[in-house]
């Protein structure tokens, strides 16, 4: 987990090469630490570094939305079924990556899925991220598939 924070901090400096190196190092350490039966009982909840939201967000920060989308999608697939709040977070960041790649059909679909999941519960963080997604999508409001999503996102902020 600490390694993923290092990846994100490095991304904030704009050093994509170092961020990728740190992620590879974290993955290697994860694999090494998972081998054998000598792990403490509490380690079960630790997920693969490349599946953590921090790494996907780091590559969004670096302006590499395709890499971010891949990492976030893998992390989304690894979530526990009941992790609804986390699912909204991942979906929101994936939709952001898709919008930045200008895959507006995918961004609209993923944003709608995030809204559907968010409707099942209430989270201030999710509401805040969805509001940020609306601002991200605003750049593409003229696209036929984006306008309705922005309107629906606006409804979550009120």
Image (cartoon, grey):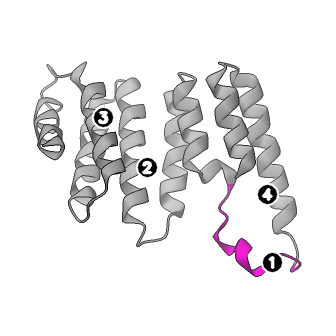
Q: Name the residue beneath numbered marker 3.
A: 133
**Image location (x, y in percent) of residue 151:** 10, 36
Q: Splitting the image into 4 quarters, where does residue 17 fall?
A: top right
Q: For mark 2, does the 10 Å Cα neighbourhood hold few (<14), some (14 to 19), or many (20 or more) residues?
A: many
Between the residue at mark 3 and the residue at mark 4, the CA separation in whole angstroms equals 32 Å
Q: Report the span colored magenta.
A: 37-48
Q: Name the residue beneath numbered marker 2.
A: 90
The answer to the question of whether label 3 and label 1 lie on touching residues, with beta carbons closer than 8 A, is no
**Image location (x, y in percent) of residue 76:** 48, 56
Between the residue at mark 3 and the residue at mark 1, the CA separation in whole angstroms equals 39 Å
The residue at 43%/49% (across/down) is 90
The residue at 65%/48% (across/down) is 50
Specify which label sits upstream in the sequence, 2 or 4: 4
Specify which label sits upstream in the sequence, 2 or 1: 1
Q: Name the residue beneath numbered marker 4.
A: 30
Q: Name the residue beneath numbered marker 1.
A: 40
- Viewer-proximal residue, 131 or 115? 131
């Amino acid at each position: 987990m600490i390694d993923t924070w290092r990846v994100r901090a490095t991304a904030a400096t704009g050093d994509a090469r170092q961020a990728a190196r740190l992620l590879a190092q974290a993955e290697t350490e994860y694999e090494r630490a998972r081998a054998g039966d000598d792990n403490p009982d509490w380690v079960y909840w630790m997920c693969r570094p490349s599946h953590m939201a921090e790494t996907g967000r780091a590559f969004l920060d670096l302006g590499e939305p395709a890499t971010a989308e891949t990492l976030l999608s893998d992390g989304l697939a690894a979530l526990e079924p009941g992790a609804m709040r986390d699912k909204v977070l991942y979906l929101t960041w994936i939709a952001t990556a898709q919008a930045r790649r200008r895959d507006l059909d995918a961004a609209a679909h993923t944003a709608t899925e995030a809204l559907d999941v968010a409707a099942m519960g209430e989270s201030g963080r999710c509401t805040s991220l969805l509001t940020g997604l609306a601002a991200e999508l605003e750049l593409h409001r003229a696209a036929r598939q984006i306008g309705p999503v922005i309107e629906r996102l606006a409804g979550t902020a009120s």
